[in-house]
Amino acid sequence: MNPVCDVADNYDQYFASQLYDQRYPRPNPSSFAIVAREIQEGRVRVLDFGCGNGRYAAPLLEQTNAMIVACDISREAIDELSVRCAKHVDTGRLRPVCGDLSVLTNTMGRGERFDLAILMFGVLGHIFSRALRQKTLAVIRGLLRPGGRIIVTVPNAARRFLKQQVVARRWVQEGNFEPGDILYERKADHVVVKMYYHLYNPEEFMLEFEQQGFRLIQVGAESFLPESGVVRSTTLHWLDRALAIIAPLRYAHGFLAVAEVAPDADQVARAPQIADPGLPG
C-alpha cells in the first residue's frame, strides 16, 4: 500500500476552494509565450493535458487560432473551464474532456492527431509512478502527428519541498515511493489540500523524453523565482527574466522542455540545447 492521495478528489477541492486561482491567477508569461509561438508557427491542433480550469487554454483561445482538446481528471476544473469558455465549446474550438488518458484516447476520432501537446504547471510530476509517467509520455507521443511537439514543465528537486523530501525518505526506504516522490499540502482558511509530486533533476527530465521517443529541442528554466509570485506580479516576472540571463539552470525553480516526435521513436535523441525558454518573450 502506498501513501499517495487521491489526486482527482484533491484537485476538485483545490479548484472549488478558489485556492488554485488565488495562487495562479494567470499562466506563466514566459511559458505562455513559448506555447503561443508554437501555435503561431502552425501547430494549431493542441492537446492541453492536465488543463485545470483553463489557465493556459482560455488565453490561448483568445490570443491564437488554436483548436484545443483540454483534458483533466478533475470534474470541478472541467466544469469551470466549460462555463468559462462556453463560446469556444459552442464553436468547436474547445473540446473539454474529463478523465485520464484512456478516456481521452476513447474520444479521439480515427486518425485524429495533434500538432502540439502541453503539460504545464508541473502536470507530469503529479503522475504516480515513474512507469505511469513514462506511459503517459508514450501515449501522448502516439497522439501527436509525425514531427508534432510537446512542451512540459516540472519542479526542480534541488529547489522545491526540501523538508518534504526528508520526510519522504522513509516511504522510499519502505518501497512505497521512488526517489524524488513527495507529499505536500496547500492550505487556505479551513481547506487543506494534500498533493503528490515527483521532483526532477535535469538529467532525469531529459532521459524520460529520450526513452519515450522524443527528440529534445530545448531545455531551460520555467522560472527561477517561485511561480506563484511570477504569475501574480509583473515586477517579479521581469526580475525572473533577468535571473534567467545570468543564473545557472540548476538554480531554476522548475524546468521547461520542448521536444518533438523523433523520426524513429526507438532512436536515442541527440543532446538538447540548454537555453532560457523565456527568450524571446
Image (tube, rainbow, N blue to C red):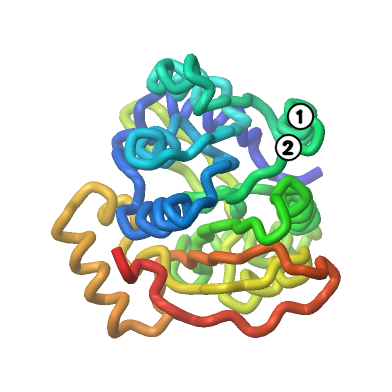
Q: Residue furthest front?
A: 42
State the residue at coordinates (31%, 42%). Answer: 26
Question: Mark 1: few, some, or many residues within 10 Å (few <14, many ≥20)?
Answer: few
Answer yes or no: do the residues labelled 1 and 2 have beta carbons within 8 Å?
yes
Compute the Cα span from label 1 to label 2.
5 Å
Q: Which quarter of the picture shows residue 15?
A: top left
Q: In this view, does 238 lie above or below 103?
A: below
Identified by mark 1, the residue type is Gly
Say whether residue 118 is left or right of residue 264.
left
SS under mark 2? loop
Say whether residue 280 is left or right of residue 88.
left
Q: Quadrant of the C terminus?
A: bottom left
State the residue at coordinates (82%, 69%). Answer: 264
Q: Which quarter of the picture shows residue 87?
A: top left
Residue 38 in sight = yes
SS under mark 1? loop
Q: Name the residue under label 2.
A: 112
Residue 51 drawn at (x, y percent): 52, 37
State the residue at coordinates (43%, 33%). Answer: 54
Identified by mark 2, the residue type is Glu
Say whether residue 133 is left or right of residue 229.
right
Q: Is residue 188 above or below residue 42?
A: above
Q: Which label is found at residue 109? A: 1
Q: Is residue 5 above or below residue 259?
A: above
Residue 45 drawn at (x, y percent): 57, 42
Q: Quadrant of the N terminus?
A: top right
State the residue at coordinates (29%, 36%). Answer: 22
Q: Is residue 253 above or below residue 112?
A: below
261 or 111: which is nearer to us? 111
Residue 129 in sight = no
Q: Which residue lies furthest to the right in this view?
A: 266
